[in-house]
Amino acid sequence: MPQNFVNASTTLEVQRLHIDGGYVDATSGETFTTVNPATNRDICEVQQAAEADVDRAVDAARRGFEVWSQMPAMDRTRIMLRAVEILRDRNDEFAHLETLDTGKPLSETTTEDIRTGADVIEFYAGLISSLHGQHFDFPPAAFATIRREPLGVCAGIGAWNYPMQIAMWKSAPALACGNSFIFKPAELTPLTALRLAEVYTEAGVPDGVFNVVQGDHRVGQMLSRHQGIDKISLTGEVGTGKKVMADAATTLKGVTLELGGKSPIIVFDDADFDSAVNAALVANFYSAGEVCSNGTRVFVQRGMYEEFVSKLAPRAEALKIGDPFDPDVVVGPLISREHHAKVMGYMDIALASGARHLCGGTVPDDPALADGNYVTPAIFADCEDDMQFVKEEVFGPLMAVLPFDDEDEALRRANDTNYGLSGAVFTTDFARAHRVANSIQAGSVWINDYNALPASIPFGGYKQSGVGRENGLVTIDHFTQWKTIYANLTTFDAYY
Ligand code: NDP
């Protein structure tokens, strides 16, 4: 294994902020600890940004913006593509660091987290030269140009489940549009965003264009409220989204909010059975269930219901749970002791609900895993819509299976939620697939698939699952503003 790859027992020196193209010390004198979720051993201390450090990042970003936004488009494309190249070259190194900090198995981080982030940078890098405005003629002697201009300094606040990927998903469209960026990772997973800052700098991104400030929700608040920041993009819980939106309103900056979900999967009797079972498992147990778009309410039509239910537990019990650095492991620990306690609380609620317990929801008895935040994948059948664990986002490996009779009923129940992030329909009936997909109230709906999220298609929530979109062309509109320039080619006459 190359020397710069971390492993389960790695500890690191104190991590600093990355502002204006390099590492700087925070002025707060405060630090926090980041912990390995697989062992609960400390990885390192991280410096917490003070208000003065956020101001410093904003000043640097303002200067960076002046340089970056004036750089020729092809130069910016080349720089961002160089970042993609470095990210791909060092994919496994960054994946190991992500595994250390998040507990996500290497089987995921080496194949998904860094790559899908790099894909998004590549997608937006390729668009830069094509970003354009509009032109209107007003004969005989006037015209208007509508310029697409960057916003200025944008900021991102990340969740802990896809730390480096979120930093890339947010910064890529912002930078492609000519903005500069300040990113605050979640306090639980502060490490890889700093590596992204190093990569951007190495690739030639000018100083100040991408900055990382570390810290807890206080730093998030400083960014949301800051007069010098023009846009804020959060990935987090619904409650946090509401606070960020309220704080952003104090300066009327725009927001993009990627929030939680409680997404439905609707499986009809005519579905390809194995595909539907596979999807239910992946949509609940990938990343130990810590995925916002997961399909945690699995509605199965009665004709297939018992057979479907009978297949789930053996498959879930066969998933290898354990040390996320073991390449065969597919279920790692949860992010923190607190989150583990919350998820175990939902397991108790589910056990007491009267739903049929099929498997899991326990702490594994392997003594080697005793120090980590592990919980076995849990499945409950015969669930009812109003059970607490069926209604609320658990963000852990807890699948609820619910029987239904007909399409209208399934849709009514699937849509009976304040969330609207995603959903799926499994059927071989072409017309029904599209009818149901059109009627699910969610930002992303998959037909006979789950969690496919290529860089070119928008992702985001309906209802309380979010505001705005990430990825795809539409996101360009979230990181630019239109300027209308009306030009008169003749004299200007007084109206009076
Ligand atoms: P949180 O909402 O707790 O935190 C998200 C980020 O917001 C963290 O960086 C956090 O800082 C920061 N924060 C917390 N309070 C404030 C505040 N008042 N003002 C500004 N920033 C604040 O979410 P989690 O990190 O627990 O992530 C899990 C949630 O994220 C789930 O609900 C999940 O569904 C959602 N999510 C949504 C995704 C999507 O794309 N729709 C994708 C992934 C996750 P700190 O942690 O340091 O306190």
Image (cartoon, rainbow, N blue to C red):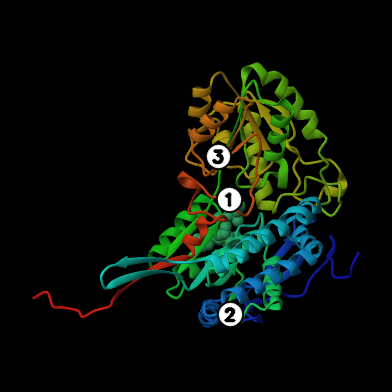
- The image shows residue 309 at horizontal and vertical percentages of 71, 24
Can you identify the residue that label 1 sits on? 457
Q: Is mark 1 on a helix, strand or loop?
A: loop
Q: What element carries label 2?
A: loop
- The image shows residue 125 at horizontal and vertical percentages of 62, 66
The kind of residue on which mark 1 rests is: Ile
User: In the image, which is nearer the foreground, mark 2 or mark 1?
Assistant: 1
Q: Is residue 92 above or below residue 47?
A: above
Question: Which quadrant of the view contains residue 356?
Answer: top right
Q: Which of 244 and 451 is in front in this view?
A: 451
Is residue 330 visible to the viewer in this orientation of the structure?
A: yes
Q: Quadrant of the C terminus?
A: bottom left
Q: Nearer the viewer, residue 101 or 57?
A: 57
The quadrant where ligand 1 appears is bottom right
- The image shows residue 226 at horizontal and vertical percentages of 45, 72
The kind of residue on which mark 2 rests is: Gly
Can you identify the residue that label 3 sits on? 392
> Real-space Cα distance between discs 1 and 3?
27 Å
Answer with mark 2 or mark 1, whichever residue precedes in sequence. 2
Is residue 188 visible to the viewer in this orientation of the structure?
A: no
User: In the image, which is nearer the foreground, mark 2 or mark 3?
Assistant: 2
Left or right, residue 339 beside residue 274: left
- The image shows residue 274 at horizontal and vertical percentages of 74, 28
Q: Name the disc covering residue 319, or none.
A: none
Q: In this view, does 275 lie above or below 161?
A: above
User: In the image, which is nearer the foreground, mark 1 or mark 3?
Assistant: 1
Can you identify the residue that label 2 sits on? 208
